[in-house]
Image: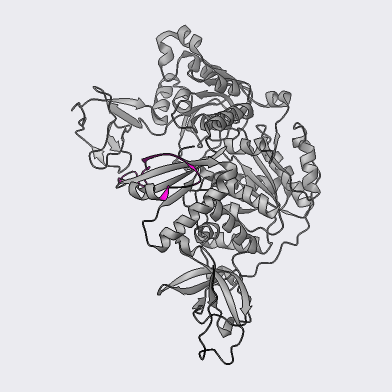
Amino acid sequence: MVMEEVALPGFQLEDAEPRLIARVYVDTDLPHLDRPLDYLVPQAWENIDLSGYIVQVPLSGSKRVGWVLSCERVDTPSPTIRELIDVVSSCSVVAPQTFSLARYIADRYLSTVSAVLSLAIPPRRASVEKEKHLPFDGDIKTQRDASAWQPYPYGTNFIEHLEQGDHPRCVWTSIPGRSTQEIAQLTSATLTSKRSTLIITPTQRSAQRLSCDLEDLLSVPVALYTAEQSAVERYRIYRQCSQGSHRIVVGTRSAAWLPLKDLGLIIIWGDGDDHLREIRNPRTDALDIAVARAHLQHVAMAVGSFSRSVKAQYLVMRKWAISLNPEREVLRESTGRFFVSDDLDDERQGRAAHALLPPDAYACIRRGLTEGPVLILAPNAGYIPVVGCERCGAPARCEVCSGPLTLSRDQSIVCAWCSRATHNWRCMKCQGTALRWWRIGSERIGEELGRSFTQVPLLISQGIDEQRPEINASPRIVVATAGAQPDAESGYAALIIPSAAALASRPELWAPEEALRRWLTTAALVRPQGQIWVSAGLDQPLAQALIRWNPDEYIQRILDERQVLRFPPTASIVAIDGPEDQLNSFCKELPAELIGIVDAPRSDRRTPNQGIRRALIRCNTEDYPQLARVLRERSGVRSARKLYPLRLTLNPPELF
C-alpha cells in the first residue's frame, strides 16, 4: 500500500505553483533503485523537453549521472523531491523505444536498466552534439531482384512481404558464395518499403567487407559501427542513426542497440559465433536483442549462416520464425565434397592413422595442390600450446600463477597466462623433468608440412595476425586457425580438418554445435566440388550432417535432446553466484527447481573465487516470467538491506 505524503496542518505552502518533474533512471546497479526516480527541473530548464537527455542528479550524498525517461508537470510536488544538479547533454540521447527495450531486457535477464543502458549507449562526446546531422533524403533506386532467393522455397514470398512493409521472420541456411547477394536483396526489398536495415556480423573484418560489398551492389551509402572505431566516431554514428541520416548500418555486437529511424529489418549473420555474445551483465547476445526488438518494435528479422545455432532453431520450433533451406540440387552444386574418416579407414592405414595428418590427409593435400591452394584448419594456435609431464601425464603448470605452460618454436617454456619463462621445470606431482606435447598448434603443423612439401609456398594465419592476405589461385598450403582463414580468389581446392574429435567430443554441451559451425563456415571457402577431408572419431549423426550439408536436422536433434533433459533454450536455468550460506536462504521457497550448488567459475583465471559458490535453479519457459519477478523482488530487498550482492545470470553461456 502506497501512502501519499501530506503536509501537516499549518505547514502547507500558501502559493504552491505547478512544477516540472523529471523521471530519471540513475546510473546505479543497486536493484532496489531500478526504477525512475523523481527530480525537480530547475526553472531555467522548464521550457526544454528533457526526455532522453543525460543529466546529473544527487543521490545518497553524491553526484550521479542519469537518463531522463519523461517529464511531467505536477500541481503539488512532494517537498522531499530534490532538484537536478545539471543537464549534461545538449540534446536528447536516448530514444523512447530504447527505454522500452532496456526495461524489457533488464526484466527478463535479471539486470538493471542502468546496466543495460550503459551497454546500449556509447560514451558521450560533446563535440559530436554540436554537429548538425540532417536526415537522409537521397534518391534510393532499388531493383526488384529476388534471384538469389529463388532456390529457397518461400524465399521470394519473404522478399515480397518485405517490399510490402510487413515484418516477417526467418532463419535461413545460406548457400556458399551467395550470402552477400542474399543479404543485398533483403536490404533492397526493405529499402523499397522506405525502411532502414540493420545488419550485425561477428567481427569488424566481416562487417567492413560486407559494408563495402553492399555499397557496390546497391549504390547506397552504408554506415559502419564497430568496437574498433574511436569513441567520437561511434557516438557520431549513434547520433546520425537516431536522426535518420543512415538507411543501412553494418556493425558488430553493440550495433544491435542502434536507434535506427524507420527500422524495418534486422539481419543477424553468423549468430552462433561467440563474438556476438556479451561478456558483461546482462550476458545477452545479439540474437536476444534482435528478437526483443522484433517483438517490441514490430520489425522484420532474418538470421542466417552456413550452419545453424540451437537458439535460432528454437525460434523455428516455436513457429516464431520460418526455416528457409535451399534446394538440395543447388546446394550440392555450390559446395565441396566431405570425406569423413571412420574406423575402417583407420584400420586400412594402420598405425599411421593415429598421426595428426595420416596418409589419407596427405593424399588429399597432393590432389588439391594440382588444382589450387589447400587450407589446413589447425585446432590451436602457437607451436605446442599444451604440454604435460611425460612420466605421470599431469598438465604442466606455472609455479607463479598456476597457468598452463606452452612450448614455443625455440623450445622455451612460457606460461600462457603471465608470460613468464620457466627454465628448470619440475612436475609438482611426480617431480619429473621431461615434457611431452598434448596438442599441436598451427606453427608446428606448418613446420611439418614445410618439410613434406618443400617446393610449395606455405602461409600460417592465426587469430593474433591483423593482416589477412588474399590467396590467389596458384598452388600453396595455408595453415589457419578458426576465424583467421584468408579468402582464396577462386576458392580452396581442398580443406583438411585434423583432430576433429578433439573439439566435437568435448564435455561441454555447446561442443557439437560449435564444431559444426566452425567446419561448415570454413568449408564455405572451398570451391564447388572441392575435397574436404575430416579426421576420424566423429559421431555418425554429426558426420552425416557434414556429408549431406544438412545442419538444421542435426541441430534439431540436439534441440530435442535438450528438451528431454530440460536444458536451455527449451527450459530456463538461472545461475546465482554468492556465498553458500547466502544462497541457501535466497533459494528457499522459490517457484523453481533447485538443481544443486556447485563451485562457481572463476571471474579471473589467475585469482581464486574465495568461497563463491553457484546455485542452479530451473523452471519451464512459460513459468519464467513469474520466477524472474520473484528473483528481482528478492534482489531488491537484499540490496535495500545492504546484504551481500548475489549475481544472477539467465542461461549461463559457459554451460550451454
Residue 312 picture quarter: top right
Whole-percent x, y for residue 633 in the image: 49, 57
474 left or right of 60? right
Is residue 587 magenta-colored? yes
Whole-percent x, y for residue 129 in the image: 58, 70
Whole-percent x, y for residue 485 in the image: 52, 34
Closest to the observer, 291 or 338 = 291
Residue 334 picture quarter: top right
497 left or right of 451? right
Is residue 269 magenta-colored? no
Asked if residue 161 shows in the view, the reply is: yes
Q: Is residue 169 above or below residue 89?
A: above
Q: Main secondary structure of the magenta part?
A: loop
Q: Is residue 414 above or below residue 80?
A: above
Specify start and end residues of the magenta stretch as a single range: 586-608
Closest to the observer, 634 or 70 = 634
Asked if residue 253 shows in the view, the reply is: no
- For image coordinates 56% across by 46% down, the residue present is 624
Closest to the observer, 606 or 332 = 606
Closest to the observer, 92 or 419 = 92
- For image coordinates 75% across by 47% down, the residue present is 188
Whole-percent x, y for residue 394 in the image: 27, 27
- For image coordinates 53% across by 48% down, the residue present is 627
Q: How is the image coloured?
A: one colour
Q: In what quadrant of the picture does the N terminus appear? A: bottom right
Count of labels in the image: 0
188 left or right of 241? right
